[in-house]
Structure formats: structure tokens, C-alpha cells
Amino acid sequence: MSDKSRRPKIILEPDQRKQLVNIQRRLLLRSGLTLGAVSMLTGCNLQDGDEVDKVLWAMSRWNDRVQGWLFSGQKLAQTYRADQITTPFRFNAYYPEYNVPEIDIPNYRLEVSGLVQKKASWTLEQLQRLPQESQITRLICIEGWSAIGQWKGVPLKTFLQHVGADLTAKYVGFKCDDRYYSSIDMATALHPQTILALDFGGKPLPPDFGYPLRLRMPTKLGFKNAKHIGAIFVTNENPGGYWEDQGYNWYSGI
């Protein structure tokens, strides 16, 4: 089967198309690229599905490569003081707030699979016993807003080391209990500010913000920070993501 036949068809609402074009333009400008690719896009009729798909996917793949080249595994995102925390912190998801999933905490198990030596599932108590890191960082949403929050949790690098993950693999994927899914590159997974958050604002992670476990990465746009994580896997095949498979830039660094 060819790559073209395997590639999912992009089906976007008008507002999503506008957001996608805007974010691609910002990423191109930030990466120091020419506006040639953008002019190709703006010259297309947004109703010409196949042609627009080709341009958008080509731009997205190019942006992924450029951002991967520019990413520094040790450069830290900006941190903030406690008095700069955004109150109230904003809810965001692909569904309304009243559809936040109910998690059976006593029976919660984090599944582990893929290129790891230890595939046993983890309880919430086991995760809480791992070393924890705290950060006050800004979450930046693709919709144009941002908010500063305080997060505490297990560095993803620490967790991957505990399960014997192949740290030379390309991707870490996440499956969530709200039917969301996403993935990140291994370099981002090993970044010191990438954590599996268990607490928010000094308290256990609340339902609206992804309890009992969410990904927190100040180096990525908000939609990459998967919530209600139920499974983690390591792979050399790009697993895509909920929004990424609809055309959003996969890397989405900031």
C-alpha cells in the first residue's frame, strides 16, 4: 500500500481550516522560511480538497523537520512566579466541559507497551512514589490564548527509564480515557520539563485538567499535552494524533 493511500483524508471545519493556515504561517515565519509555500496555499481554493491536502501535508512535514532540527533537548521554557499564575485556569478540550470523563480511580491502571522491557501496568500509587518535579509554566493554546499554571509530576524521562524504554526509539504515544490520542518525539519526551503531571496548583489533578494523569510540556502547544492518559507506548512508527490526523502540525513546538 502506498503512503498516499495510507494517509488520512483531511476533513476540517471552516474555523479549523483558518486556525491551521494561521499556525502554519507562524511556524514558517518563525523558522526563517520563505513565504513561497504560504503563497502556494493561499493561491489554492479551499474547496479543492485533494490539492489543499497535498500542500498542507507537505508544509506540515517540512515544519516537523525544521522544528526537530531547531529543538534543544536542554533549553528550558520560561518559568514564572507563583503570583503570576492564571486564576481561574482555563478549561480546554475537544469536547464541552460537561463531557469530562469519569475515571474509576481505585481501578485505574496505566498501560505500558511497545519498545519497553517492562510492560506491567502502573497504579496511581506507584506513579506517586516516583521522583516528582514541580514547574510553573505557560500553556499556549493553538486558538490564541495562554494561561500560567503550577504542575507537579513524574519526569517522563524518569518513567521511561523505569520501564526500560528504548530511548533511541523515535516516538512516545499516548492513549487517553476521553478517546483522545497523541504522540511526541523522543527528544521532547526526554526534555527535563516534560512531565507526567499528577498535581495542579498544589492539589491532585482535577477532572477538568486531566485527572488522574496528563502530559505537561511547556515546549509544545496545548493540544499536544494529552489528558486522562490511560496508556503509554514507545514506537518507531509515527502514531499521529487526534488533531494531527486532521491536519494540525504534528511537532507543534513553541
Image: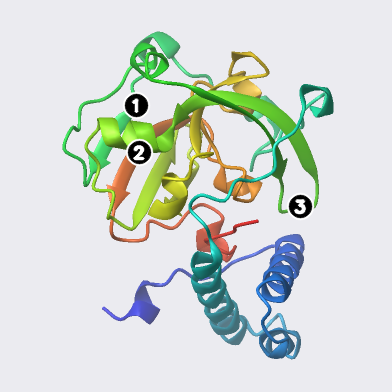
Residue receiving disc 1: 110
Residue denoted by label 2: 232
Q: Quarter holding the C terminus?
A: bottom right
Disc 3 marks a residue whose amino acid type is: Glu
- The residue sitting at 20% across, 33% down in the picture is 119
Residue 215 shown left or right of residue 145 in the figure? left
Q: How many numbered marks appear?
A: 3
Closer to the camera in the image, 18 or 192: 192
On screen, residue 246 versus residue 36, left or right, reads: left
Q: Position of residue 174 (x, y in %)?
A: 41, 42
* Proximity of marks 2 and 1: CB atoms separated by less than 8 Å: yes
Sequence order check: which comes first, mark 3 or mark 2? Answer: 3
Nearer the observer, 141 or 192: 192
Q: Is residue 90 left or right of residue 181?
A: right
Q: Quick one: which residue is furthest to the top in this view?
A: 106
Picture residue at 74% right of the left edge, 63% below the top: 19
Q: Is the C-beta separation of discs 3 and 1 under 8 Å?
A: no
State which quadrant residue 237 falls in: bottom left
Q: Vertical placement of 183 versus 164: above or below?
A: below
Q: Residue at coordinates 54% horizontally, 39% vertically from top-left?
A: 193
Q: Residue furthest front?
A: 74
SS for callout 2: strand
Above or below residue 198? Residue 36 is: below
Q: Answer left or right for 162 relative to 124.
A: left
Q: Is residue 133 visible?
A: yes
Front residue of this view, candidates 236 and 71: 71
Q: Amino acid at mark 1?
A: Leu
CA distance separating discs 3 and 2: 27 Å
Q: Rounded to the nearest whole Å, what is the CA distance between mark 3 and mark 1?
A: 30 Å
Read off the residue under disc 3: 143
Q: Quadrant of residue 112?
A: top left
Disc 1 residue crowd, few under 14, some 14–19, many 20+, Cα 10 Å: some
